[in-house]
Amino acid sequence: MQTIMDPQAVRQFARDLRQRADDLGRINGQASAASISMQDTWRDAKYDAFLRLLDEASLEIRNFCDYAARYADHLDKKAGGVERYLEDRY
């Protein structure tokens, strides 16, 4: 089996993935902070249900952001390996 990879494209994707994960993490934190400030004006069963769902979603988003950062690191290492291979080959 032959694998074709453009190291520059992979590194660009890794940078984009990190940036989007950072953006998503920041937005997630802002949404959580905003929901907490709503406690003063909105406190009923619907709010409690919403807060539970938001907490679950927030955890999933944090897990995704962590995974995305680790995967971006993995992609950078793979791209580095391909770059070394190409340098040695040519």
Image (cartoon, rainbow, N blue to C red):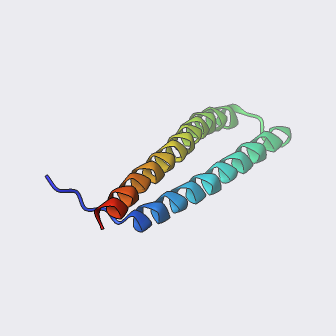
Q: Quadrant of the image for the C terminus? A: bottom left
Q: Nearer the viewer, residue 81 or 66?
A: 81
* In-image side of 74 versus 2 (left or right): right
* In-image side of 35 versus 79 (left or right): right
Q: Nearer the viewer, residue 7 or 55?
A: 7
Q: Relative to 9, is 54 above or below?
A: above
* In-image side of 1 versus 7 (left or right): left
* Residue that sits furthest to the right in the current view: 40
| Rendering quarter of residue 19 | bottom right
Q: Nearer the viewer, residue 14 or 83?
A: 83
Q: Position of residue 37 (x, y in %)?
A: 82, 43
Image point (86%, 39%), residue name: 40
Image point (56%, 43%), residue name: 61
Q: Relative to 6, is 65 above or below?
A: above
Q: Position of residue 7 (x, y in %)?
A: 39, 63
Q: Position of residue 84 (x, y in %)?
A: 39, 57
Image point (57%, 58%), residue name: 20
| Rendering quarter of residue 47 | top right
Q: Relative to 11, is 77 above or below?
A: above
Image point (79%, 43%), residue name: 38
Q: Position of residue 1 (x, y in %)?
A: 13, 52
Q: How many marks?
A: 0
